[in-house]
Image: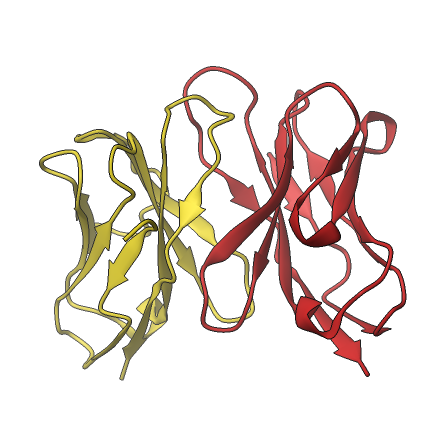
Chain colours: A red, B yellow
């Protein structure tokens, strides 16, 4: 069955430190891949997406993600975390091509930022 | 407004009551999705519309859940005879196209609490 796994439930980093959030997917073929951020009481905001081509994708708010086919991974990174980045982050995947299938989400990683 | 609008923002229902949750997608968006997000979990797919046609309802948890989008714009998710396990945030999302790579835009959700 198709699935998205985020191994880390909760991560705490110091402000200014680097960040990497892990995401692994299990699909028959490479899916479309997304990272969303959700602040408390808010909907999900798209940070970045990967469809094909360059495996390093840039997103909003200084985030980037790298697609690694060999590892079935799409990890999210940020060189220097700001206190405002504290939120929950969701990796998601959708079947490639054809009509729109449903988006499958991981369970999320909650990011806390220490001053 | 420019974004996806959901109402009400919060809903408290007594067990057994019927509820109706409304979603106003971004104008012109063809696709509309409903997701259910339980506390501490990632969103889970409920149903998908392309214009007024409900193309996928495989995620609806029971026949107490019903969604419609009669004119291909506003959508309503109805839950009959609510149960405590229905307590969750219900997220609506829309996208401009029907292709798999068309990104989703999410509303802020309706938090349903069944007492």
* Nearest to the observer: residue A84 or residue A113: A84
Q: Residue furthest top?
A: A98
Horizontal side, residue A11 vs residue B80: left or right: right
Horizontal side, residue B14 vs residue A100: left or right: left
The picture places residue A99, in percent across and down from the top left corner, at 41, 19
The picture places residue A85, in percent across and down from the top left corner, at 69, 67
Q: Residue furthest left?
A: B70
The picture places residue B87, in percent across and down from the top left corner, at 34, 72
* Nearest to the observer: residue A9 or residue A77: A77
Check the image and report above or below for A12 versus B73: below
* Nearest to the observer: residue A23 or residue A81: A81
Total marks in image: 0
The quarter in which the C terminus of chain B is drawn is bottom left
Check the image and report above or below for A52 versus A67: above
> Is residue B49 something that shows in the picture?
yes
Q: Residue at x 63, y 27 (%)?
A: A31
Q: Residue at x 50, y 39 (%)?
A: A103
The picture places residue B39, in percent across and down from the top left corner, at 49, 71
Q: Residue at x 34, y 38 (%)?
A: B58
Horizontal side, residue A113 vs residue A46: left or right: right
Q: Residue furthest right?
A: A17
> Which image quadrant is residue B95 in?
top left
> Which image quadrant is residue A34 in?
top right
């Amino acid at each position: 069955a198709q699935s998205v796994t985020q191994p880390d439930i909760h991560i705490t980093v110091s402000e200014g430190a680097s960040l990497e959030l892990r995401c692994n997917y299990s699909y028959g073929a490479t899916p479309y891949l997304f990272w969303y951020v959700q602040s408390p009481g808010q909907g999900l905001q798209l940070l970045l997406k990967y469809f094909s081509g360059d495996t390093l994708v840039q997103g909003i708010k200084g985030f980037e993600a790298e697609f690694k086919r060999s590892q079935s991974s799409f990890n999210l990174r940020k060189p220097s975390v700001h206190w405002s980045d504290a939120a929950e982050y969701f990796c998601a995947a959708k079947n490639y091509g054809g009509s729109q299938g449903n988006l499958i989400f991981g369970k999320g990683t909650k990011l806390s930022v220490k001053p | 407004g420019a974004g996806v609008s959901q109402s009400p923002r919060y809903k408290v229902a007594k067990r057994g009551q019927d509820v109706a949750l409304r979603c106003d997608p971004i104008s012109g968006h063809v696709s509309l999705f409903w997701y259910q997000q339980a506390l501490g979990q990632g969103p889970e797919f409920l149903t998908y519309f392309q214009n007024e046609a409900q193309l996928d309802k495989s995620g609806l948890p029971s026949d107490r859940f019903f969604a419609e989008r009669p004119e291909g714009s506003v959508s309503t998710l109805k839950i009959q005879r609510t149960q405590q396990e229905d307590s969750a945030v219900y997220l609506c999302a829309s996208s401009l196209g029907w292709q798999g790579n068309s990104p989703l835009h999410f509303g802020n959700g309706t938090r349903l609490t069944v007492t």
